[in-house]
Image (tube, rainbow, N blue to C red):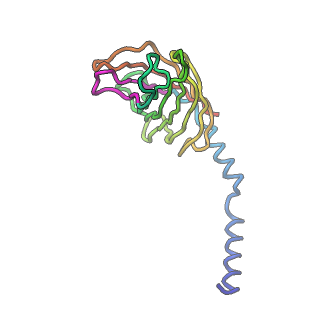
Amino acid sequence: MNQLNMAVMVQFLVLLLAHSPSFSSVAEARKLRKSSIPTLTVYNYLAIKGPNSTQGFNAVQCGGPSPALPNLFGAVFCFDMPLVKKKRVDSELLGRVQGSWTTTQLTGGTIVVSETFILTNKTSLGYRGTFSALGIENIGRKTSKPITGGTDDFELATGIAVTTPLGNVTLDAFGNGVLWFKYKFVFQ
């Protein structure tokens, strides 16, 4: 490249940088956009595969000690559950929550949960994208986990995911253990 072309290229880059938004203003714009996400409330139902079930479940044991322990210590479960607008199976589908949990207490009752929330577009929420939560849950009790941002409207988002179990475990027509949860996402 000759000196004239190099000089033109340098001038072009200087002009481009002078008229483009600064990195700090882009970060500030993202922060402003993220802070405007309201608290969102969604519901989901967990249907753990029963011993003889072949359908209707959305969570299965996908790992654990061999032979299995009577208290499920060390058992790993994988899930892909619907997120719905109301506590009804036929409610508006807002997205999915996918992930896993591991039972981590010898006496039972405590699990470590890793979950990614996938909110699809064209729903009444008005937001789309993904974000994740990771933390400890005490089975049957309201718990919270930190939210870390993901994609689209939730890029760089932070906050708390509050999980509240609703009622007791019941059996569905296929022998799966079913339990409803309410998720409240408080973005900061």
**Magenta residue check for 172:** no
Is residue 170 depicted above or below 104 in this figure? above
Q: Residue 89 lies in what quarter of the image? A: top left
12 relative to 122 in the view: left or right: right
Q: Quadrant of the N terminus?
A: bottom right
- Residue at 49%, 28% in the rendered image: 101
134 relative to 98 in the view: left or right: right
Q: Position of residue 60 (x, y in %)?
A: 38, 28
Q: Position of residue 33 (x, y in %)?
A: 62, 43
**Magenta residue check for 50:** yes
- Residue at 43%, 24% in the rendered image: 86
In front here: 43 or 79? 79
In front here: 171 or 40? 171
Magenta span of residues: 42-61
124 relative to 33 in the view: left or right: left
Q: Quadrant of the C terminus?
A: top right
Count up the numbered dots: 0
- Residue at 71%, 76% in the rendered image: 11
In front here: 10 or 173? 173
Q: Position of residue 128 (x, y in %)?
A: 49, 41
Q: Residue 40 lies in what quarter of the image? A: top right
Name of the residue lying farthest toward the front: 67
Name of the residue lying farthest toward the top: 168
